[in-house]
Amino acid sequence: MSAAGRHYVCGLRCVRCGATCALGETVYNCAACGGNLQIEYDYDAIRGAWRKDELARNADRSIWRYLPLYPTATKLDCLPIGWTPLLRVARLERRLGLRHLLIKDDSRNPSASFKDRATAIALARARDIGRDLVTGASTGNAGSSTAVLAAAMGMKARIFIPKAAPRAKIAQLLACGADVLAVDGTYDDAFDLCLAATKQFGWYNRNTGYNPFTREGKKSVSFEICEQMGWHAPDLVVVPVGDGNIISGVWKGFADFHRIGFIDRLPRLLAVQAAGSAAVVNALAGDGTIKPVSGETVADSISVSVPRDGEAAVQAVRESKGFGITVTDDQILAAIPEIARDSGVFGEPAGVTAYAGLKTAVEQGRIDPAWTIVVLMTGSGLKDIASVMKVAGEPRAVPANASALSEIFKKG
Ligand SMILES: Cc1ncc(COP(=O)(O)O)c(C=O)c1O
Ligand SMILES: [Zn+2]
């Protein structure tokens, strides 16, 4: 632990069986049942030590403005992460017949995805316990985020990816000097191999959900939404779901702020999955138990057979009184130009999945048009050009002379 400050963690609690344990150096999951762990804080102490007006005066416009609610005592002196724009999108609002629609554009993080929030807290932890090498399995974004932030910090990243990950994500990993292991299999295979390697070699593991620090970073998005909305939670937050760690983090963020009295009510959550990769939404529609699926979708970032934070995701949606919905790959792809043309925000397939799900929910009459709704945009369209080009159209070919141009534009 760094001597620079203190943190307010009082322990970890298993999301499956409720067993508690202390914050050991590399405690990942529950010793009793193998479930994922949730980090718990001394909320009374935080309430006493931290006030809203003090936070409002903090000039640090990054995730680090919320340090008392993180499990690390020191900030990572790193690229600026978080405090991403919350954009009112009037034309999309009109298109869907809603009154107050906002996009939280997390493609604007240093590695161009939401994952930087989680990586920052995981790397801060690695630093706290004196580790310089971080490993992780990734559909692409968590890995490239680890590579980018590790490069910024002078740390090492060893990343397992499915060999079919989009080229742009692989390029980002390689350019940042990560040791990239392209697994001949799916994301789930890469995840299991990375876990086996962690046990064998003792590397610090950042895997989504398995490492309880990832959820703690992801919750920062909710802190920002509350502040950007004048200390109010929206009525509904719409989240794309793969492993379920973003949505469980989103819930933790609102719940943490509620517990320390910074907001006075909680939002509903809408979990959106691709129809071919819908283990969490299936569980929500059933008895809450996660059952593996084949995990096939064009949205590579949410292509998951066994969601690694699925239990926490189901709990989050249920506690919020929200619901789950699925969308087809065609609906996901169609959402890319629809959002881009009506707002200028350019998302990758998983990034636009929340909007596609909201649109479907509106069509099904499940959304009150008067609600204030925040849609998460979790990754940049530049991450997966091949998918975008399936729906973006082609440029018009023109000869390189001006008279030919006047011919073309005369015709309109
Ligand atoms: C762009 C993007 N959106 C959504 C997700 C889903 O997050 P989670 O797997 O935590 O549910 C991911 C995860 O990789 C992602 O990269
Ligand atoms: Zn347990």
Image (cartoon, helix red, strand yellow):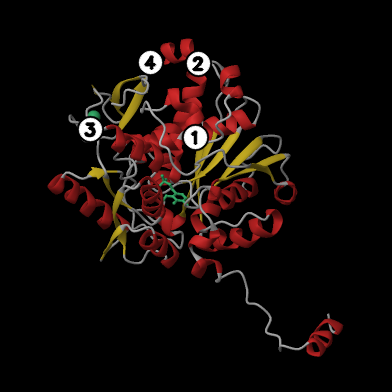
Asked if the residue under mark 4 is in contact with the one under mark 3, i.e. CB atoms within 8 Å, the reply is no
Q: Sequence-wise, which precedes: disc 2 or disc 3?
A: 3
Residue 159 is left or right of residue 58, and the answer is left
Is ligand 2 closer than 8 angstroms to the Cβ of mark 4?
no
Q: Is residue 221 left or right of residue 135?
A: right
Left or right: 280 in relation to 197: right
Secondary structure beneath label 1: helix
Judged by depth in the image, the label closer to the viewer, 2 or 3, is 2
Question: Which residue lies most toward the left here?
Answer: 200
Nearest to the observer: residue 367 or residue 227 = 227
Helix, strand or loop at label 4? It is: loop
Q: Is residue 288 visible?
A: no
Residue 167, picture quadrant: bottom left
Amino acid at circle 1: Ile
Q: Which mark is residue 27?
A: 3
Earlier in the chain: of badge 4 and badge 1, it is: 4
Q: Amino acid at mark 4?
A: Asp
Q: CA distance from mark 1 to mark 2?
A: 16 Å
Q: Earlier in the sequence, mark 2 or mark 4?
A: 4
Pointer 2 local density, CA inside 10 Å: few below 14, some 14–19, many at least 20: some
Say if 191 sits above or below 48 in the image: below
